Image: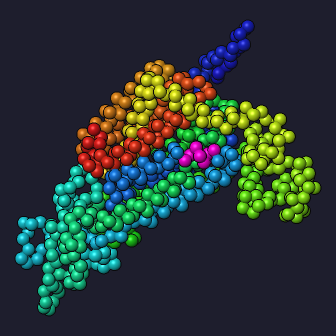
Amino acid sequence: MMENITEPGTGVFTTFESDNDKRPSVANTKRTLIEWIRTHMDRSMLVFQLFYFFFYAAFGSLFPLISIYFKQLGLNAIQCGILSGIRSFVECLATPFWNALAEKWKKGKSFLLASLVCSMSFTLGLGFVRPSPEGCLVQLPYYDGYNETSGAPLTIIGPYRSLKYDDIRSVDMTRDIALNIKNKIGQSPLYLNTKKLVDPPKAEPGGGRRRFIDQNMFEASNNYRNPTHYPPGSLVMPLYSTVVYSQNKINQIFIIIILLVLFGELLSCPAIPLVDALVAEKTHVQPASLYGQQRTFGSIGWGLAMFCIGLALDNASRFPDYPCLDPGKREKNYMVCFATYSVFMAFALFTATQLSFTYEGDQESMYFKLVKDKMARTLLGRTTKNRSKLVNEENNVEEEAWKSESDRSQSKSAPTNEEILEKQLGIKLGGAGTQTMHADKTDTVPEESYITSAHLKVTKWVHAMHQFCKPRLLAFLFVTWFMGLGVGQVFTFLFWHVQELDGSPTLFGIATIINHVSEIIMFYFSKQIIDKIGHLRVLYLGLFVNIARFLFVSWITNPWWILPFELAQGLTHAGVWVACCSYITQAFTPESRSATLGFLKVVHYGLGRGLGACLGGLVISSYGNSLLEV
């Protein structure tokens, strides 16, 4: 038995073990476990934890593989890099605008739900935009008179998924039958060398079973070898695919995809920042680590979803609408990813309906009322009915009664929308005519506060950029941007490179689990590490490990060897970002920290990650994967 004895004069409980029972206490272990669960599974924060889990599970089930999906459609590395980089650019530029608008109009929940709906709609649209195939690469049976030393008799026939033949088979695209231009590891799609194709043999007349299929299958085959119809380099094929595409049609589809990505990201980017702000507001009176604990559920959702998707994709080799007889050995049906994304995002949307923003209330639509008043005054030459009376359903005045003196006197007694907003915001609204009408009410807000409110954010940003002009901070900013380049390249082209090494989707899922676990561990212990070795040493260590990681990935030939260095992502991503934010909070005054952290995010995630994806695609398209990693 365990006995608690209070020491005299101290009030401290000392625990002694009785002689009857010296075994480890199971009750203490259970109590510790229950306390841990209570800390991490707070019921008041459960809705936020579920939202983060579902949202990032949706994101992790599709977007880490989106570049490989585009690669399978025939897009090259430059196009995939642009599609990935533009997301980072738009997110950093548009998010502050939407957040400020949601705060100003007090419509946070409406903006959140609308952004989730737009994210689901535009993202699912990507799954239904595909280039139309030109034909299928097939191997014919050897026939009399064919020189077998020339290789297998290959030709292109039109899409024939509805037809079945026993004497032809689909052929995967390899580098042996491609032109020498852009034919290095990582470069895709490959330009088909039409000179290595053969003319279809003539069907032999006579009775019995013919050796070759019907000649009408090859009526258009000779056009593929005709340089007038298809100049060299106009026919492309993704590596290990059986479908032949036209480069012109791929470029047309790229324009449609980039518009979907652009508008989708533009309209969906405020979702996570709005929820982050709400969580920060809920946890501001609790330990600072509580906010990070909520975001941890996002990492868990991302990792688990990606792992399950990897297992599913390894068995998703059937296509209900595949244009050729058989798919290539590396082709996967990525509609599994889109379907999983839609399910998780639907759960996230439902969870978001349970969130409540504190400013949602009776004054929620005041800005819309004011905008309607101004539009009516400008377009119709009159004002609308008094809003304060409309809200209370007490306005029975005729539309043209505003011209009379009696109504003007009533409007002075009942405050207008602009007056209500001026009192709420502490700023002056309207032009010269409005200032004349309310000249007797200028005592509500001092003139100095108008200027301060109008230029507050601009002043903070100018001051932050001026502070970064110091050589020490410029060097720090360059390191932050350079690390962002690595983040963009890893996110966009790591799995692209691993697939070239014959890596499977299951490997992608295992790698994702490892790097997310390492990030979670680093987030929990980053403060202790920074306190022990300092901010700059963490940055130096992150740079060194990043260089070693890229060199290692460029040298390996077995894709499974990427797993050990996936543990380094906790330091190169999470550790470096935490060190940057912590360094900024110490280098700047509290008044300018918000602006400097926003500027730092633009440099790291916007310019760094966005340019990293674009430059990575350019390097791969020009020189291959190995040089990119170097």
Instruction: Report x, y in % for residue 538.
Output: 43, 25
Instruction: Report x, y in % for residue 596.
Output: 54, 32
> Which residue ends up furthest to the bottom in the rendered image?
207
* Total marks in image: 0
In this picture, residue 213 sits left or right of residue 495 = left
Query: Is residue 95 part of the magenta span, yes or no?
Result: yes
Instruction: Report x, y in % for residue 346.
Output: 58, 57
Residue appearing at x 43%, y 62% in the figure: 256
Name the one closer to the observer, 245 or 266.
Answer: 266
In this picture, residue 361 sits left or right of residue 178 = right
Residue 304 visible, this orientation? no
Residue 191 visible, this orientation? yes
The residue range painted magenta reads 94-100
Name the one closer to the observer, 421 or 221.
Answer: 421
Instruction: Report x, y in % for residue 517.
Output: 46, 38
Residue appearing at x 47%, y 40% in the figure: 605
Quarter the C terminus occupies: top left
Query: Is residue 61 part of the magenta span, yes or no?
Result: no
Q: How is the image coloured?
A: rainbow
Residue appearing at x 52%, y 26% in the figure: 467
Name the one closer to the observer, 521 or 67.
Answer: 67
> Which residue ends up furthest to the right in the rendered image?
406
Name the main secondary structure of what is drawn in magenta: helix
Residue appearing at x 7%, y 78% in the figure: 144
Quarter the N terminus occupies: top right
